[in-house]
Amino acid sequence: DKKDKLVEKEESKTGQVKASVYIAYMKSAGIFFPVFAVLGSLAHHAVILGNNIWLSDWSNDKAINGTQNIALRNLRLGVYGALGVGQGIFSTIGAICFILGGVLASK
């Protein structure tokens, strides 16, 4: 009697996952979460690139009598901090959208 058994034998398949499975998964995740996960990740990497360019430009500043221009230093620190905040925000947006999209698709 199969009805009396608590455990049934499972079948496992080998090979590649069919494209239809990926398409069904993406459809159930909706369009919003995957798009914003990718956009958040792209924006995060763009801010990292901007951060690297900013630091490279900053390292080329000339010292005047062994000191830095205080106003320029403060500007550089402010932009560097803003880029760091932007990096955190975009990374968080991308991660949250990725997680919520996965949860939604798994239902």
Image (cartoon, rainbow, N blue to C red):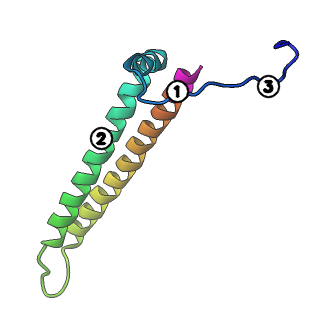
Which numbered disc, 1 or 2, marks the residue that appears first in the sequence?
Answer: 1
Q: CA distance from mark 3 to mark 1?
A: 19 Å
How many discs appear? 3
Rendered position, 27 above or below 60: above
Rendered position, 91 above or below 30: below
Q: Residue at x 23, y 60 (%)?
A: 52
Residue 70: image location, x then y, percent: 23, 72
Residue 95: image location, x then y, percent: 46, 39
Identity, as a three-letter code, of the amino acid under mark 3? Val
| Residue at image mark 1 | 13
Q: Quadrant of residue 91?
A: top left
Q: CA distance from mark 2 to mark 3?
A: 48 Å
Q: CA distance from mark 1 to mark 2?
A: 38 Å
Specify the segment rendered in magenta.
102-107
- The residue closer to the viewer here, 25 or 79, is 25
**Crowding near the residue tagged with mark 2, few <14, some 14–19, many ≥20 C-alpha atoms within 10 Å:** some
Rendered position, 17 above or below 54: above
- The disc at residue 7 is 3
Identity, as a three-letter code, of the amino acid under mark 2? Ala
Q: Quadrant of residue 92?
A: top left
Identity, as a three-letter code, of the amino acid under mark 1? Lys
Callout 3 touching callout 1 (CB < 8 Å) = no
| Residue at image mark 2 | 43
Label 3 element class: loop
Type of secondary structure dominating the magenta stretch: helix
Residue 106 falls left or right of residue 3: left
**Crowding near the residue tagged with mark 3, few <14, some 14–19, many ≥20 C-alpha atoms within 10 Å:** few
